[in-house]
Amino acid sequence: MKNDQNSAAIAKLKVVPLPHPFRLAAIILVLSLLALAVRSAAMNPKLQWPIAGSYLFNPLIMNGLLVTLIVTALVMVIAVVLGTIAALMILSPSRLLSTPAKVFVWFFRGTPALVQLILWYNLALIVPRFELWLPGLGTVFSISTNDVMTPLVAAVVGLSLHESGYMAEIIRNGLQSVNQGQREAALCLGMKPSLLMRRIIIPQAMRVIIPPSGNETINLLKTTSLVSVVAVGDLLYSAQSIYARTFETIPLLLVVTFWYLVVVAIMSIGQFYLERYFSRDNVTRQGKGMLKATFGNAFSVRRRVTQ
């Protein structure tokens, strides 16, 4: 009886969360600075917002955005394929396979993307023609390097090789994150290596692979702006071709910035749901929507007690 009375008294107690006055002050300061920054940008006539708005859906800009998205998709697909092959070679017990793969990753990850782009664009200076020569038959195939290595091809090849070095390390780390005991247990049950990889290793490794791969894809989207150096008509190159004639540099750069931010925001949302899909065992903990999970506690000045 006494215990019941104590439980009832405890249930009536009002629990007051610990206040955080410094957090409230920080929120006010950040909001004030943000408001000042927005007002300063909106009221600055040199930014020429009306002109930027008029170019927002310009056909040349839209075509450049499409080229940027296509290059990003092509490069990422090729980089994932090459990175997977390199990662499997690195994990091979044979040094004849692992050593060349490590050199491949070291070289293409260690050289700047811009250098690789310029090198592939000027490949004709090193290899003037691609030829296939067979004993007894002579040259059976020959084509000029400039006919093959167009600016778009040079951009895709250069960025793909550069990106594959990073993807190889991401995939290798993901594969190695799976506990060795699970591999041994699956092999003891009679699983073939291919089935082991498909059913056991890859589903678990994806939880480690997806987050950095998503970040790398977003970073690649922004890196594609380098292809303007080799005259690929991407988003930045399209804007440059316009302001080279009109001298409206700042408005066009604002347009480029706007579209990059829009695409990155969409990709970030996709990455969030993709990560949640491959972390289905944590779905109860991550059950909130992205916006609610991001902004739900943004203005909270009291500490929440989780149970």
Image (cartoon, rainbow, N blue to C red):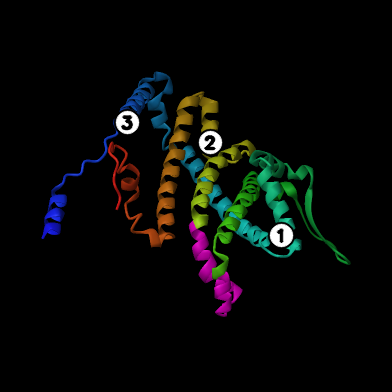
| Residue 120 percent coordinates (x, y) | 70, 45
Viewer can see residue 150: no
Q: Is residue 273 magenta?
A: no
Looking at the image, is mark 1 or mark 3 nearer the viewer?
Answer: 3
By secondary structure, the bulk of the magenta-drawn segment is best described as helix
Tell me how many marks there are: 3
Residue at left offset 42%, top offset 29%: 52
**Whether residue 203 is situated above or below residue 149 in the rendered picture:** below
First in sequence, mark 2 or 3: give its number.
3
Tell me which amino acid carries mark 1. Ser
The quarter of the rendered structure image containing the N terminus is bottom left
Q: Give, as a single range, the part of the protein colored magenta.
A: 183-207
Determine the CA span between mark 1 and mark 2: 39 Å
The crowding category of the residue bearing disc 3, from other C-alpha atoms within 10 Å (few below 14, some 14 to 19, many at least 20), is: some
First in sequence, mark 1 or 2: give its number.
1
| Residue 285 percent coordinates (x, y) | 35, 55
Tell me which amino acid carries mark 2. Leu
> Which residue position is annotated with label 1?
98
Tell me the element at label 2. helix
> Which residue position is annotated with label 3?
27
